[in-house]
Image (cartoon, rainbow, N blue to C red):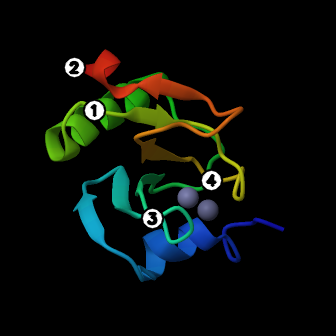
Amino acid sequence: MNNPNTCELCQLVNHRNIYTQFHFENDDFIIVNCNTCNVPMVVLKHHRSSFHYEEKKQIGKILISIFGSQGYIDWKQRKIPAHAHCHLRMIPFPNSEAELLSKYV
Ligand SMILES: [Zn+2]
Ligand SMILES: [Zn+2]
């Protein structure tokens, strides 16, 4: 399961299966509202399980430029662990891997 052919996030990246609000796109990321959580979700444009350190810094700066510096980046990948993504949440879930977004200012 979760190979690039069936991966829900690859479908989003490659076929633009976006059913929610679209926010941003560049060469590395797409930001749309998560259709489960209804908060902004950053999706890497490659099928790999985690972001590189430099990518995390870029994500922080992009999120701040679009949404302001309130809230948390939740790095925890629950439903689709094989494809790097993260959520912007105002209140992090229990057991999340949340970092204050303002850390990336
Ligand atoms: Zn994928
Ligand atoms: Zn979600």
Dot 3, how many residues are within 10 Å of its Cα: few (below 14), some (14-19), or many (20+)? some
- Asked whether mark 4 lies closer than 8 Å to ligand 1, one says yes
The answer to which of marks 1 and 3 sits earlier in the sequence is 3
Instruction: Give the quadrant of the C terminus.
Output: top left
Give the label, 2 or 1, closer to the camera.
1
Point 47% across, 47% down: residue: 87
- Asked whether mark 3 lies closer than 8 Å to ligand 2, one says yes
What's the mark number on residue 70? 1
Q: Does residue 82 appear to the left or right of 92 in the view shown? A: right
Q: Which residue is mark 3?
A: 38
Point 56% across, 69% down: residue: 10
Point 62% across, 48% down: residue: 48
The answer to which of marks 2 and 4 sits earlier in the sequence is 4
State the separation of the CA atoms marked 1 and 3.
Answer: 17 Å
What's the mark number on residue 43? none
State the separation of the CA atoms marked 4 and 3.
Answer: 19 Å
27 to 74, vertically: above or below: below
State the separation of the CA atoms marked 3 and 2.
Answer: 24 Å
Q: Amino acid at mark 4?
A: His
Residue 51, image x, y percentages: 53, 36
Give the label, 4 or 3, closer to the camera.
3
Q: Which residue is mark 4?
A: 83
Q: Amino acid at mark 3?
A: Asn
Marks 4/3 in contact by CB < 8 Å: the verdict is: no
Q: Secondary structure at mark 1?
A: loop
Q: Which residue is mark 2?
A: 105
The answer to which of marks 2 and 1 sits earlier in the sequence is 1
Q: Amino acid at mark 2?
A: Val
Residue 7, image x, y percentages: 67, 70
Point 71% across, 32% down: residue: 95
The answer to which of marks 1 and 4 sits earlier in the sequence is 1
Q: Secondary structure at mark 4?
A: loop
